[in-house]
Image: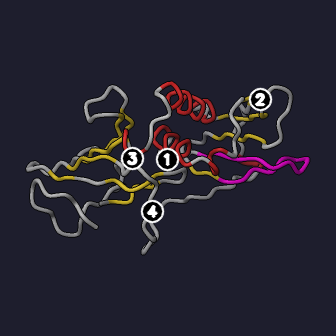
Amino acid sequence: MADVHGPLGGTVVRLRVAGDGTATGRFLPSYLSFMIMRPGPETFFSIRPAAALPEDMSESISTVDPTLLRRDGHISFITQWHLPEVTLGPARGADGQRGTQLDAPDGSLAQVWHTPKGDGFPVRQGGPRRLWDRVQEAITFWQQAGRPHYDRFGITVTPTEQYVWYDHPNSNHRWPLPTFRPLVQCSAAAPRPGRTVKS
């Protein structure tokens, strides 16, 4: 079993290792997390100074409540795989209003304010990608799929790639994960083929 978490969400997955060294398995049906024994290099919390905001920031309105990324485990879970390298932190407007900020290594950034305005929540985003658009796409997929629980998703890890899938490993719905370091570490000692990985 492995605890697969990122800055936005995650839970525990049960993996089996095949003879070729590929590990695959489904997430457990309920949320679970192991105690962190050693912190990794990733930053789970980000506040970018106002002077460092992208120059092409644009404004829009979102029907998605940004606080759901903190309050709803399923929404944070599915959003994590759509934006695996993004960090999450608070945003503070010039007028003191509170919001949620998403920050990516490529310079992309999104800020969504918690106080509704008109038909939704004000959004500011800029950089190479529109991060909040990806959040809305992730939530739309989850809703259209019937709001599936964690165990409808799984993960596959090979020597060259690792990705999350929906329903089965060969699904058309697959989300690649960063491979600069293993997000999933199966075991300190290589398990025997066909055995379930245990912590």
Quadrant assignment for the N terminus: bottom left
Judge whether residue 92 is colored magenta.
Answer: yes
The residue at 12%/49% (across/down) is: 18
Residue 2 in view (yes/no): yes
Rounded to the nearest whole Å, what is the CA distance between mark 2 and mark 4? Answer: 36 Å
68 and 87: which is toward the camera? 68
Judge whether residue 104 is colored magenta.
Answer: no
Question: Mark 3 or mark 2, which is nearer the start of the sequence?
Answer: 2
Tag 4 residue? 33
Amino acid type of the residue that numbered disc 3 sits on in the rendered structure: Pro
Q: Tell me the SS state at disc 4.
A: loop
Amino acid type of the residue that numbered disc 1 sits on in the rendered structure: Glu
**Crowding near pointer 4: few (<14 within 10 Å), some, many (20+)?**
few
- Res. 174 image quadrant: top left
Q: Is residue 190 left or right of residue 48?
A: left
Question: Mark 2 or mark 1, which is nearer the start of the sequence?
Answer: 2
Tag 1 residue? 85
Tag 3 residue? 178
Question: Mark 4 or mark 1, which is nearer the start of the sequence?
Answer: 4
Rounded to the nearest whole Å, what is the CA distance between mark 1 and mark 3? Answer: 7 Å
Q: Is residue 183 left or right of residue 22?
A: right
Rounded to the nearest whole Å, what is the CA distance between mark 2 and mark 3? Answer: 29 Å
Which of discs 3 and 4 lies nearer the camera? The answer is: 4
